[in-house]
Amino acid sequence: MKLKVMPELPEVETVASGLAKHIVGLKITDVRVNLPKLINLKPALFRKSLLGRRITAVRRRAKVIIIELSRSKRIERIKRNNLNQINRLDQLTEYLVIHLKMSGQLMYLRPADSVQKHTHIIITLSNGRHLRFRDQRQFGYVRFYDRAGFESFLAEHSFGPEPLDGFSLSDFRELLKSRPHSKIKPLLLDQTFIAGIGNLYADEILFYARVHPLKPAGRLKPVEVKDMYVGMQKILRKAIKERGSSVELYVDADGRPGNYVRYIKAYDREGKPCLKCGRKIIRIKIGSRSAYFCPKCQPR
């Protein structure tokens, strides 16, 4: 099955958690930029900004990977010698923000591993390994920010709540009440409403809850809201456990494909029998997006 969707929450979470196991604690010793349009600074300044930085954390927010970087040696010395400076120093954490978009890959590789076509950024780490960003379609990006720039980035995108991070059924109910006229499939895709869900998992959540993708949020029955919430939790967690769905070019940080494709019930199954009732899955267009659903199990 060839799935043409960008990596969503489970895929990005898989890459971020995989990288965290490998690169936290390492320093950046070299940076090579082969395609400057994918970064937000001039290559020389981008390289200078990263050299010598220690990686202190790797995490995900919505569909972006965030790599936290330590201070310079001078600032680290101040912190060791003057504990009163800690609060001020914490404000000097810097960040790499990486969006994979449609075809981006962020992999932890050995220097001996062949450099594949479309590898645009290579970051060498203090253990000799590489962090390589590859993007065939060139829609992704790698951006360096200081704390102020990072906060501006977050404010600009206004990401909604994370569906797996302290997100309750009552939270979900309240969100839906705030957008009663919005059709549910586009609403799930709105990153300011809930962060991280895209085409594939929205279709799977709606199939699980037996909800038509065009149903307005305000017309959802209480049982449908509950089933959507339960489906969201089960499906996203299962997809993370299976290291995501191998969309067109998606691989994890070690270059491995994800396994969740085998569990897909609706997405990209147009014309195939519903796994619950046998009716054919159909596809409709909602704006520029497609929605796959069973007309019998998910009546309008």
Image: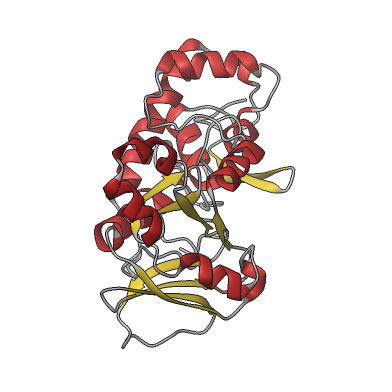
Q: Is residue 267 at least partly visible in the picture?
A: yes
Q: Quadrant of residue 139?
A: bottom right
Location of residue 218 with respect to 238 vertically, above or below: above
Q: Work out which quarter of the rendered image holds the C terminus and state it.
A: top right
Q: Left or right: where does residue 228 sit relative to residue 151?
A: left
Q: Residue at x 32, y 47 (%)?
A: 79
Pinpoint residue 298: horizontal percent, then vertical percent: 53, 29
Viewer-nearest residue: 135 or 147: 147
Q: Is residue 260 at least partly visible in the picture?
A: no
Q: Farthest residue to the front: give it.
A: 81
Pinpoint residue 291: horizontal percent, then vertical percent: 61, 43
Viewer-nearest residue: 10 or 16: 16
Pinpoint residue 46: horizontal percent, then vertical percent: 56, 68
Q: Quadrant of residue 166?
A: top left
Q: Left or right: where does residue 295 sit relative to residue 256?
A: right
Pinpoint residue 267: horizontal percent, then vertical percent: 51, 48
Q: Left or right: where does residue 41 sit relative to residue 75?
A: right
Location of residue 173 with respect to 241 vertically, above or below: above
Looking at the rendered structure, the number of numbered marks drawn on it comes to: 0
Viewer-nearest residue: 28 or 18: 28
